[in-house]
Image (cartoon, rainbow, N blue to C red):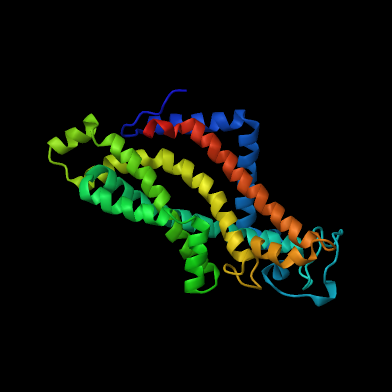
């Protein structure tokens, strides 16, 4: 597999790379299926209110007369104990399941990547300070740290998102540092230093653009992982609070009914499983394409 050169990208190189990514995804059935699932997931999240058969019930409106109805032509996935249509709840719940992970990953990248690039490029005591702080955060499992932070800050979707950002940024710091360490002795960096280009310009113009490939791979996988983490926090009562729709919260509400009213928890759990698996499969494909091993 031809490695993508670590140079300043041109428009033609970017176009060729995109074509290569597209051709690989199209040729690989699993990657193609996962991409289709992710695209459908995004479209469902965007047009949730138009797609959901009972959008008000999806948003939390109760209908006690329809409590715990089994799947039927009127309610394809049945209803929960408050009579809300499960299909509508899952569709409307796709919106926070998309928006929150994107926000968490975006801010984790925004915090972690520049810190890692600075540490790897400068080295010395700056590298030591940044990486020891990073190691301190990485010493705790991400979900466990998020649970502790959420418990301290209070329950809620926004608190859970902040907690996940705090626990997720160190991974991007390590990736960016690895890239920066491998680049700081390259000729184009030394040439920039020789002509008096400032460290800030070198980092933002030469180092950070070359972190895009490994960061993109990690971000794709992390989107699925954050969806799973958000669902876990909601399941434990630390994330989204009723009556707002959340897949993890639906699984939690249906766990006591799993033997008789199995649909309450099953379909929401299945939605989490499918979307997370799709992001992981696509991330594996992108990893094969960009081959981040070249940065180690």
**Quick check: 89 left or right of 160?**
right
How many marks overall? Answer: 0
Q: Residue at x 28, y 47 (%)?
A: 119
Quarter-of-image position of residue 277? top right
Up-down: is 103 above or below 208? below
Q: Is residue 19 visible?
A: no
Residue at coordinates 26% horizontally, 50% vertically from top-left? 128
Of 6 and 222, nearer the camera is 222
**Nearest to the observer: residue 22 or residue 292:** 292
In this rendering, position of residue 123 left or right of residue 194: right
- The answer to whether residue 190 is left or right of residue 17 is left
**Residue 224 percent location from the top left of the image:** 57, 50
In the picture, residue 246 is in which quadrant? bottom right
Q: Position of residue 206 (x, y in %)?
A: 28, 39
Q: Is residue 236 something one can see in this rendering?
A: yes
Residue drawn 12% across and 41% down? 196
Q: Is the C terminus in the top left, top right, bottom left or bottom right quadrant?
A: top left
Q: Residue at x 29, y 41 (%)?
A: 207
Q: Is residue 60 above or below residue 231?
A: below
Residue 84 position within the rendered picture, expressed as x and y whole percent measured from the top left: 76, 69
Q: In this rendering, is residue 229 above or below 152?
A: above
Q: Residue furthest top?
A: 1
| Residue at the front extreme, as displayed | 139
């Amino acid at each position: 597999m031809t490695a993508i050169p670590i140079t300043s990208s041109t428009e033609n190189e970017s176009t060729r790379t995109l074509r290569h990514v597209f051709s690989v995804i199209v040729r690989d059935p699993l990657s193609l299926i996962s991409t289709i699932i992710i695209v459908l997931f995004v479209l469902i999240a965007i047009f949730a209110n138009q797609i959901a058969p009972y959008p008000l019930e999806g948003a939390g409106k109760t209908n006690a007369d329809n409590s715990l109805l089994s799947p039927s032509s009127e309610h394809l996935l049945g209803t929960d104990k408050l009579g809300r249509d499960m299909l509508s709840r899952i569709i409307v719940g796709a919106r926070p399941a998309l928006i929150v992970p994107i926000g968490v990953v975006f801010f984790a990248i925004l915090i972690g990547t520049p810190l890692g690039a600075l540490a790897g490029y400068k080295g010395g005591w700056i590298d030591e300070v940044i990486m020891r702080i990073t190691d301190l955060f990485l010493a705790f499992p991400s979900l466990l740290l998020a649970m502790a932070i959420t418990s301290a800050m209070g329950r809620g979707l926004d608190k859970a998102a902040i907690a996940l950002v705090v626990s997720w940024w160190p991974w991007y710091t390590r990736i960016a540092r690895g890239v920066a360490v491998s680049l700081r002795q390259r000729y184009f960096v030394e040439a920039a230093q020789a002509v008096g280009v400032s460290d800030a310009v070198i980092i933002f113009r030469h180092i950070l653009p070359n972190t895009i490939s490994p960061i993109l791979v990690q971000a794709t996988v992390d989107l699925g992982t954050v969806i799973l983490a958000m669902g876990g926090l909601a399941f434990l009562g630390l994330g989204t609070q009723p009556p707002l729709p959340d897949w993890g919260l639906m699984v939690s509400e249906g766990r006591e009914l799993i033997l008789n009213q199995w649909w309450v928890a099953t379909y929401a759990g299945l939605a989490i499983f499918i979307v997370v698996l799709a992001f992981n499969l696509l991330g594996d494909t992108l990893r094969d394409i960009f081959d981040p091993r070249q940065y180690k």
